[in-house]
């Protein structure tokens, strides 16, 4: 998966117009445009699809609203802030390029398309997956945990490139993607176990999936104990048959394996049962 990080005037302006108001000045400007050019403002809402289909050649049918924003004294500053965010995100991404490739080839084992990532102002607080191959990111980079944004971007991309399951199965998909990105990928990057990180509501399910997850990763059974100690997740390895075929699966196939076999994977009687209807 190759990525290209871009700041584009039309994408940036569209999100400033229709996203959260990031300052008092922007709020007042949006209100002024609405009061004076209501029809043009409404028409601009429809431009998002056209912009993101072909951002290099996009020409608005009516550029009234765009020109008003472009001519304000604040816009140059806002664009500069977005450019700074783009550079920061690119630095984090490029620094972990080798692990990004490992994630796709060895953990997901699934082809992920190349991505255009449009960077907007961090105050907008969005990660918007527009379609396959296009993401809009406007997020604050946590100074203490700068990798957090990297994980969020990967989660959004991978989640939207794996097929959707029936509602009762989505919990398995979410848990396994956490194991892949927030846990295993993060562990490789940081050099310390990240297996206690993730949604509290998924922790119990991830513990039941964990033995099979190690098999999926191709960890030999004789090494399970070392991984249990590393990740602080303990299970009785002797009670699990080693499923050799898992290490040949991709992430989607593994999700489907876990859904099909949920009754013997999830062994805790008090855990709610999930419908076993055929996928």
Image (tube, helix red, strand yellow):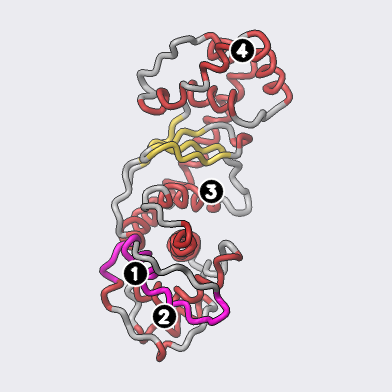
Q: Quadrant of the C terminus?
A: bottom left
Q: Earlier in the sequence, mark 1 or mark 3?
A: 3
Instruction: Please check the rendered image and state whether residue 251 is part of the magenta-colored stretch, yes or no.
Output: yes
Residue 219 is left or right of residue 117, and the answer is: left
- Residue on which the image places disc 2: 264
Q: Which mark is residue 257?
A: 1
Q: The residue tagged with tag 1: helix, strand or loop?
A: helix
Q: Which mark is residue 149?
A: 3
Which numbered disc, 3 or 2, marks the residue closer to the eye? 2
- Residue on which the image places disc 4: 38
Viewer can see residue 186: no
Viewer can see residue 235: yes
Residue 61 is left or right of residue 200, and the answer is: left
Q: Among all residues in the image, which is located at the extreme bottom?
A: 238
Residue at 33 percent of width and 43 percent of height: 2
Report crowding for label 4: few under 14, some 14 to 19, many 20 or more residues within 10 A (C-alpha).
some
Eyeballing the image, is 47 above or below 2?
Answer: above
Q: Among all residues in the image, which is located at the extreme right?
A: 24
Question: Which quarter of the figure has residue 65?
Answer: top right
**Highlighted range, magenta:** 247-271
Label 4 to label 3: alpha-carbon separation: 36 Å
């Amino acid at each position: 998966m190759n990525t290209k990080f871009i700041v584009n005037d039309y994408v940036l302006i569209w999100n400033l117009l229709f996203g959260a108001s990031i300052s008092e000045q922007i709020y007042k400007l949006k209100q002024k445009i609405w009061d004076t050019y209501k029809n043009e403002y409404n028409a601009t809402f429809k431009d998002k699809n056209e912009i993101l289909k072909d951002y290099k050649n996009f020409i608005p049918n009516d550029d009234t609203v765009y020109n008003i924003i472009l001519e304000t004294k604040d816009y140059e500053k806002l664009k500069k802030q977005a450019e700074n965010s783009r550079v920061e995100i690119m630095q984090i991404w490029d620094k972990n390029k080798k692990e990004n490739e490992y994630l796709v080839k060895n953990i997901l084992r699934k082809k992920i398309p190349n991505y255009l990532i449009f960077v907007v102002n961090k105050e907008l607080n969005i990660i918007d997956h527009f379609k396959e191959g296009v993401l809009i990111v406007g997020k604050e980079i946590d100074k203490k945990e700068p990798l957090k944004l990297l994980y969020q971007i990967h989660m959004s991309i991978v989640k939207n490139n794996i097929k959707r399951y029936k509602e009762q199965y989505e919990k398995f998909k979410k848990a396994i993607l956490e194991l892949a990105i927030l846990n295993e990928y993060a562990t490789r990057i940081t050099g310390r176990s990240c297996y206690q990180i993730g949604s509290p509501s998924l922790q119990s399910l991830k513990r039941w999936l964990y033995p099979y997850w190690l098999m999926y990763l191709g960890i030999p059974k004789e090494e399970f104990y070392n991984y249990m100690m590393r990740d602080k997740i303990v299970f009785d390895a002797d009670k699990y048959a080693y499923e050799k075929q898992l290490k040949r699966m991709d992430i989607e196939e593994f999700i489907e394996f876990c859904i099909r076999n949920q009754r013997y994977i999830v062994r805790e009687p008090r855990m709610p049962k999930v419908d076993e209807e055929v996928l």
